[in-house]
Amino acid sequence: MSQAPSYDDLVKRIKELEDILQNNASKYYYQAVKDSEERFRALSEAASEGIIITEKGICIEANKSGCEMFGYTREEVVGISATQVFHESCREMVLNNIRREYDGTYEALAVRKDGSTFIAEIKGQNYIYQGRNVRITSVRDISEYKKAQQALIESEGKYREVVENAGDGILIGNLKGEVIEVNQAFLNMTGFCEEDILNRHIRHLFDPEVIKEKPLRFDLLNEGQSVIIERDIIGKNGQSIPIEMNSKRPHANYYLAIVRDLRERKKVENILKLKNKELLEAKEKAEESDHLKSAFLANMSHEIRTPMNGIIGFAELIKSDYAKEGKDNTYLDIIISSGHQLLHIINDVLEISRIETGQVKLNYKKFDLKYLINELITFFSHAAGIQHNKLNFIQPDEEIVIRCDEAKLRQILTNLINNAIKFTQNGTVEVECANANNNIRISVKDTGIGIPDEYLDRIFDRFLQAENRNLMHNGTGLGLSICKKYIELMKGEIWVESKVGEGSTFTFTLPLMP
């Protein structure tokens, strides 16, 4: 039977148990502290911001991000003063925040090892660690954020400047259609103040009947379309203001409307409409007057031509009788020549009047162009000889069959050849024709006195003769105008090239088979 333990044995055993418990507790405690430190180390090393632990303003620990942020190694950063990594202008502020254990966020200009600077956002807090009062500080480089913030401020300033100085009204509305921003131009346009506009639906600016006729198309804006429409807006004093409204949804959170005042434009448009109406009436009166004038000239020319034919005819009969009796015909020749000249003038006036009143009819048919020109060359040979001119026809080898109004073409060539002969002495007059891309090109060239440059652009106008030609020959100046009208009626064109003292070349084209 075992002996019961004595008191001393129990006291000894209790001491042994106390030693065992104390040793185990210390071991567990130290292990817990070690585990905590390792977790802190892992978290701090993984953090993107710098973490610095200081004691009495001296760095005793820093994570990897903190070392890289300031450009130091861990060995270099441990032991340096916290104020050493800040610009001298900020050191007093940083030191005061450390002393008074300030736990808010503030900014300071930090200095890297290489001397470069950056803007740091700092937040520190004091802790009791292993019986020591330490300060754990997080540091973030916010330089890029500050640049972006400054750019945003500048952009906002530019935006505000543009909006406020815009000539057009600008409205910004939320997704409910309520106006949340308005510029001064719109207020000036309508007479409203901001309190009258802001936070009210945009439809309150319009008469209900206007919105009914031209609704606000939020559906189209939500599809990304722009809507441009003219409406009347109601100003503060009730006046109706015509506007052009260009609306869109440039952002998911708001609508934009640019409003242009159309009052001045409408006023100008009304003035232009009135002026156009007056001009149209004046044009119609002028055309009517011109038509009446042309009709009058046509009628008068027709009436004058009948007695003139009688005068010329009876003068010819008298001349015939005088010839039989052997009397002098000089005066009768003057009467007959003057009568033919006057009849030619009357015929030109009649023809231009018929052209302008649309009474000319074209009689298209096919014929041999070379035959027609050779016939005219023969006819004008005597007149060319009187002026001591050579009259030539430069003709192609092939036959040229053209379809147009033969009588009109004959008159065109007669006028051009007759003019060339009249204004040329001791020279040459040449007529040339050739095929040119389903057109016929005909030229009448002379070596006569030529046409001054200032008349070339107006040579085909009615009643115009060059001054140097007018000194030698009288006439109405209608011949070339009639030629141009006939050629244009037959879908052709005519032009002239000339040099004073060297001669002129009149060229025109006509379709071969229109």
Image (spheres, rainbow, N blue to C red):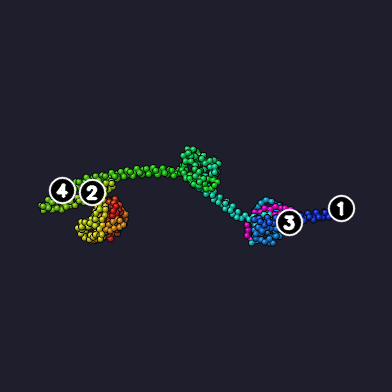
Q: Mark 1 Cα within 10 Å, few/some/many (few <14, many 20+)?
A: few
Q: Secondary structure at mark 4?
A: helix
Distance, label 2 to label 3, CA atoms, is 130 Å
Give the mark toward the camera: 4 or 1: 1
Give the mark toward the camera: 1 or 3: 1
The residue wearing badge 4 is 314
Give the mark toward the camera: 3 or 4: 3
Q: Mark 4 Cα within 10 Å, few/some/many (few <14, many 20+)?
A: few
Which of the two discs, 4 and 2, labels the residue nearer the N terminus? Answer: 4
Distance, label 4 to label 2, CA atoms, is 19 Å
Relative to 232, is 303 on the left or the right? left
Q: Is residue 271 above or below residue 3?
A: above
Kindly identify the amino acid type of the residue bearing the numbered disc 3.
Lys
Distance, label 1 to label 3, CA atoms, is 36 Å
The residue wearing badge 2 is 346
Residue at the limit of the structure toward the front, as seen here: 1
Kindly identify the amino acid type of the residue bearing the numbered disc 1.
Leu
Which image quadrant for residue 429? bottom left
Q: Quick one: 61 or 494, which is closer to the camera?
A: 61
**How far across and down, in percent of the image, does residue 438 sit?**
30, 56
Magenta-highlighted residues: 115-136
